[in-house]
Amino acid sequence: MKIDLVLQGIFSALFIASVLRISTALILPALGGLITDLSGSINIALEGTMLVSAFTGVIVSGFSQNIWLGVLAGIASGILFSGLLAYFHLYLGTNIILAGTAFNILASGGTIFLLYMLTGDKGSTSTLASGMVPTINIPFIEDIPFLGTVLSGHNIFVYLAFILAFLVERLLYHTKFGTHLRAVGEEPVAATSVGINVRRVKFISLLISGFLASLGGLNLSMAYLSSFQRDMTAGRGFIALAAVYLGGRKPWGTVLAAIIFGVADALSNQLGTLNIPSQLVQMIPYVITILALVLNGVRNRSKIIEQTKRFQEREMTRIANGEK
């Protein structure tokens, strides 16, 4: 009987709507990770940026009793956090992987320390009334059966995620800055030779990444939930990076990959009602992530083998024809 109810839940409008809400916290940082990956300085600190933004947004909102002031503070903290990472990497010469890892650790421990200092609680801000961003009901669409449940009634970050995906695609492939960014990521020496300021392009890409990741963090603490919880990102920053590569390092491919991971997360929530050990259920999103990366690696390896075969065939043909 429980299985039937779970299946009904999975094949319902409410489940699809929940996938969109859950995927938002992956789509936003994944777009940020994509931009920095294409610039040649991948932002490993997405996880930490999300934590810092989620924490700052709730704290400022709670103490000021102003939701939008909290959102602005959260965005500012995420950009500042990424700006510090960019400074360490681009001006002090720190390896960005090591620096990003250190920043993640700093964010995890730092938010817990400040949480205790400001609220006296090391677990969450449940005692602090911080509020949530409002939901948006789309006129006409909200009255359409099934479609209204899927598309209407989401918080602002859900809609922003898809709007920003479109804007990121336009930025990367239809603007001068996007061309410079991709050139810097592919051949920084060649980019420098034609007058592109490589350091500035990478710095800006990391700031944009921080902005997008901060929206993902705020979505968790001020929309999906109404409070901050210690380490509430739960690896989403790293899953977002996986989505970048699974999506072929393309904006809409990245969005689709993030949604696939969102489906796995939503599915784990549905299966939680069955008599299955909770540890196994909680593993589902991470197992799916690992399997997706393995499949992506196999796919890329097949492409390399195919390209090598075509190259060898061309060389054999050239030699047979007596060409030099």
Image (tube, grey):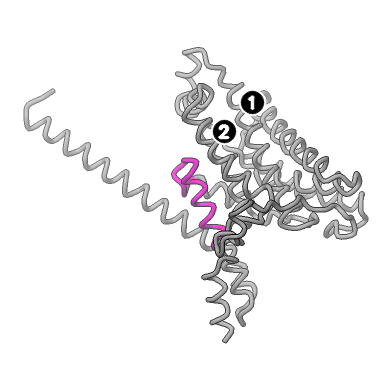
Q: Earlier in the sequence, mark 2 or mark 1?
A: 2
The residues bearing labels 2 and 1 have C-alpha atoms spaced at a distance of 9 Å
In the rendered image, residue 144, in percent from the top left (x then y), is placed at: 57, 60
C-beta proximity under 8 Å, tags 2 and 1: yes
Q: Residue at x 62, y 55 (%)?
A: 152
In the rendered image, residue 156, in percent from the top left (x then y), is placed at: 68, 47
What range of the chain is rendered magenta? 245-264
| Residue type indicated by callout 2 | Ser
Query: SS class of the residue under badge 1?
Result: helix
Q: Compared with residue 215, is residue 131 higher up or lower down, i.e. above or below?
A: below
- Write down the residue under mark 2: 41
Residue 227 lies within the magenta run: no
Residue located farthest toward the bottom when viewing the structure as drawn: 1
Image quadrant in which the N terminus is located: bottom right
Residue 256 lies within the magenta run: yes
Give the camera-side residue of 151 and 231.
151
Give the overall secondary structure of the magenta segment: helix
- Write down the residue under mark 1: 90
In the rendered image, residue 241, in percent from the top left (x then y), is placed at: 56, 46
| Residue type indicated by callout 1 | Leu
Q: Residue at x 75, y 44 (%)?
A: 53
